[in-house]
Amino acid sequence: MTIKILALSGSQRAGSSNSLLVRAAAAGAEAEGAHITVLDWAAYDMPLYDPDREKAEGFPDAVLRFKALLRAHQGFLIASPEYNGSLTPLLKNAIDWASRPAAGEPPMACYKHKVIGLLSTSPGVFGGVTGLVHLRAILSRLGSFVIPEQYPVGEAGKLFDESGAMRDPKLRAIAEGIGARTAKVLKHWPDATP
Ligand SMILES: Cc1cc2nc3c(=O)[nH]c(=O)nc-3n(C[C@H](O)[C@H](O)[C@H](O)COP(=O)(O)O)c2cc1C
């Protein structure tokens, strides 16, 4: 069975340090044989979730495609910046939309039994660890298994070279380790469908 992992950044900023960090983690998963898809938020431009809008108009096309993308992967790697001690509104909005069941869809179909590895980076020394506490709690509540290992790494501005690679091989190995661990768990995960 091919292990399929979706790599998501909680930031759509050009030059986002979290987008670079999740790519480093994805390389570790790839080395374990996983197939990686890197999410491009530009292709999934979702409005702010509004129950009245959902009732009147149903799911926007971008949400349907995002939900299908989540369902098509057994695991996710997520690197999200911390905004005011929590995850970004971009990521929370997408998580909320995808938690809404489409007609005939089992509850939490986008999240149940997914295996998830978390990372974060920020300019400060704590690397966004408080945001990961929230993200872990949310994803666990939705039915995902978030691996115990995670990697919040500080001083984001110093981490990457001009090519976007992590400068310090020791830090790069830790980031790759989150991806590798996620892929390894998935290899033995009883619910790893599709
Ligand atoms: C609204 C807002 C709130 C922020 N709050 C925090 C915070 O609580 N902790 C932190 O470490 N950084 C905080 N930051 C700084 C972000 O971590 C920083 O912008 C980071 O580089 C964003 O990640 P990116 O490079 O992937 O876009 C905040 C930034 C913004 C815009």
Image (cartoon, rainbow, N blue to C red):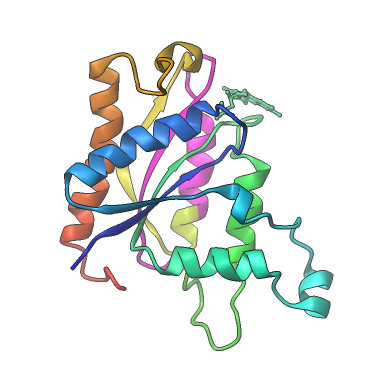
In the rendered view, tell whether residue 143 sits above or below residue 13: below
Nearest the viewer among 180 and 185 is: 180
Q: Could you tell whether 11 is left or right of 19 in the image?
A: right
Ligand 1 - quadrant of the structure image: top right
Q: In x, y percent, where is residue 122?
A: 53, 22
Instruction: Check the picture and name the quadrant holding the N terminus.
Output: bottom left
Q: Kindly tell me whether residue 150 is visible in this rendering.
A: no
Residue positioned 60% across, 36% down in the render? 86
Residue furthest out toward the bottom = 104
Q: In x, y percent, where is residue 151?
A: 36, 31
Residue positioned 23% across, 18% down in the render? 170
State which region is magenta.
111-138
Q: How many marks?
A: 0
Q: Is residue 98 magenta?
A: no
Nearest the viewer among 46 and 121 is: 46
Q: Could you tell whether 131 is left or right of 47 in the image?
A: left
Nearest the viewer among 146 and 9 is: 9
Instruction: Check the picture and name the quadrant holding the C terminus.
Output: bottom left
Q: Where, by quadrant of the figure, is residue 140 drawn? A: bottom left
Nearest the viewer among 182 and 67 is: 67
Residue positioned 23% across, 51% down in the render? 183
In the rendered view, tell whether residue 24 sits above or below residue 102: above
Residue positioned 60% across, 30% down in the render? 14
